[in-house]
Amino acid sequence: MLGKLMKYEIKATGRTLIPLYVVLLAFAIINKVFIGTGFAHKVPGLGGIAFVLTILGYGFTMAAVFIVTYFVIIQRFYRNLLGDEGYLMNTLPVTTITNVTSKLSIAAFWNIISGFVAILSIIIMAFKPIDFSRFFGEFFRDLAQLYNQFGMQIYLIIFEVILVTLIALIRFISMIYASISIGHLFNKHRILSSFGAFIVLNLVTTAIASAIGIGVSNLNFRNLHIESLWPIHLIMVLVFVFNLIFFIAYFIVINYILKNKLNLE
């Protein structure tokens, strides 16, 4: 059932986000043509205006991609589980955990896709084929040098960075959902209450992260050899565990409120 919910969620959210991706990539291609052909210089006046408009269109669309991504995932969670559609969702033969998991999974999915599309648009607009090949050539050459110095540890760190980034993203989305769920406990001003809950949760998370960071910075790493990447591994593990603990806490809060304190309008 989780797969069916995720498939439905992708269709419902993709109708809004995919056209934005297409528009962003279209603006990137148009700007690439303008830059590559020197259209603004070849057609004085009109060419400059057209180039400025396409640059502005690209910038606004880039911002819209990320703003709309979060707007859509927040709206879907609120309307689908806490709004009028909540009556329908609660009649389905699925658990609250399954509903929340589907929302979290697709929200993380669209965040990742939005990031990839944004990077792709920059590559299309800014890089020339020769620069692209040179960049990857230098990247793999530097990676080979790091491998010669540190061995498999360098690949382990890359894996750890990807894993930490993913869990941090999921933790952040779950914090948003937990804030919305807490705000829904109030009878009035639920949106304002959700915003207040988000600020409080964010402050608590930041304070604990800062305390851990100060503690780690006071550790003595001076006696370690320069070839040792142990401090980096330690930091990656701490960041992962930190995000995992908060994610689990937020997930429990969301599940508890939706299961025991749900108050649909």
Image: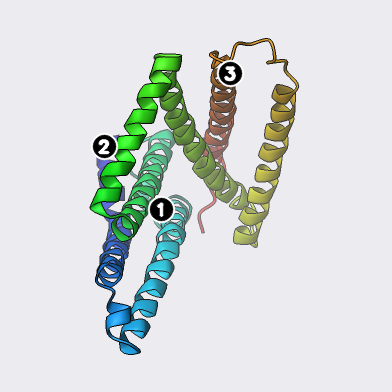
Kind of element beneath mark 3: helix
Residue 80: numbered disc: 1
Q: Total marks drawn?
A: 3
Residue appearing at x 64%, y 62% in the figure? 189
Q: Callout 1: 10 Å neighbours few (<14), some, many (20+)?
A: some
Left or right: 81 as drawn, with respect to 140: right
Dot 3 corresponds to which residue? 234
User: Which quadrant of the structure image shows residue 152?
Assistant: top left
Whichever of callouts 1 and 3 sits on the residue coming sooner in the sequence is 1
Q: Quadrant of the N terminus?
A: top left
Label 3 sits on what residue type?
Leu
Is residue 258 visible in the rendered image? The answer is no
Amino acid found under the numbered disc labelled 2: Gly
**Which of the two discs, 2 and 3, sits closer to the camera?**
3
State the residue position of label 2: 3
Relative depth, front residue between 34 and 219? 34
Element at badge 1? Answer: helix
Q: Quadrant of residue 54?
A: bottom left
Name the residue type under label 1. Answer: Asn
Determine the CA span between mark 1 and mark 2.
17 Å
Residue lying at 54% horizontally and 24% vertically, measured from the top left: 236
Q: Nearer the viewer, mark 1 or mark 3?
A: 3
| Dot 3 crowding, Cα within 10 Å, few <14, some 14–19, many 20+ | few
